[in-house]
Structure formats: structure tokens, C-alpha cells
Image (cartoon, rainbow, N blue to C red):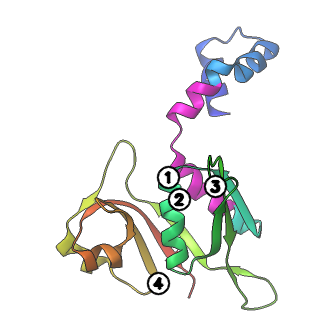
Amino acid sequence: MQIMNQLCIANPQLQSAELIRIMNDSDFAHYKKEFMDHLANFFSSLQTAHLRQKSILVIPYTNQLWQICAVLYAEGLVMGFGLDRPLRPQSLSIALKYGSTGPFPVPVIQSIVKISRQGRRVYIQAKKLGELSSPELVFLVSTSRGILSSQDAEFFGLGGEILCKIQKRA
């Protein structure tokens, strides 16, 4: 919708049929896919799925999202994850985890905040990872060994780019 508004501002004389044609154009789809931040899209989809109390979230597969799901599973924040086709994966299915406090299921993940962004990368040294440790917080760090939780990165003595902060529900 935001890109559609930009198209209208750039050329206010476009008719709605022309906008629909532009929105469906394969070049535009390639443009959108090429510049979309898949991490931000994943975090947003995960939070939305929790708000709607979905049991499974299906997202497009990338190796980075696979590594993030492995960390979320190891930290006990998702029930499981898997691929649609093992040889040529196109989508990743994630089984979401809920706690049972009260009459309604409560998501285990309370919030996800993206730390490093496309225009502003945030890095941390291995010796400063201890300052981030907290029982209710999980930081995802992109290291030379892949994406790890802040506790694992500290154990291995690896620093890297802080991707996000995940707050667990108490």
C-alpha cells in the first residue's frame, strides 16, 4: 500500500486500472522481492500469527530464517519447524508455542524488536555479550558460525551483529 501511495504521488494522473496493472507487473514483483527485508517480514509475521493464535506459520524459506528457527527451537520459543520439500525447499513451516495461563492460550514470545536494520547495523564484541544476558530476554547474534543466541555466542567467545531482541513471557 505504501508503494502504491508513492506511485500515486509520483504520477497522480494514473487511473486505478493502471495501478492494478503496475501492482501485478512481474517487474514490480521482482522489485518488491529484491528490496524487501525478509527478517523484518518474518518478525512481523511471527507476531501477527501469535496475535491471531495460529498454530502454524508458513513463510518463504531462506537459510537465515532456517538458522533463526533453529535458535528459537533450542530456546524453547517454538514447538518445531520444518521444510515443505527437503531437496528444494520453498517454504518453512513453524509450529508456534503457547502457554496456558488462564482461559486463553498465551504466546511464549511476548515481543520481538529488531535491533540491527538495513541502514544501521549494530555489532557487539564477545566480551560484552555477558551484559545482555537475562533469563527473560534472548538476543539473536549473527556470528561467523551462523546465527546464535547471545548465551551461545558468549560461550563460544564470538561477537557479531545483533539481529533482534526477543522477550519471553514470564
Residue 163 drawn above or below residue 165: above
For marks 3 and 1, the one nearer the N-term is: 1
Task: Give the Cα distance between marks 2 and 3.
Answer: 12 Å
**Residue 108 % position (x, y):** 62, 80
Residue corresponding to mark 1: 63
The quadrant of the picture occupied by the N terminus is: top right
Q: CA distance from mark 4 to mark 1?
A: 26 Å
Would you say residue 41 sits in the magenta stretch? yes
The CA distance from mark 3 to mark 1 is 13 Å
Asked if the residues shown at circle 1 and circle 2 are in contact, with their CB atoms under 8 angstroms apart, the answer is yes
Q: According to the image, label 3 marks what residue?
A: 86
Name the quarter where the C terminus is drawn: bottom right
The amino acid on which the numbered mark 2 sits, given as a three-letter code, is Trp
In the image: residue 25, left or right of residue 9: right
What's the mark number on residue 136? 4
Residue 33 in the image: above or below residue 105: above
- Residue 66 bears which disc, if any? 2
| Nearer the camera: disc 2 or disc 3 | 3
Q: Residue at x 58, y 54 (%)?
A: 42
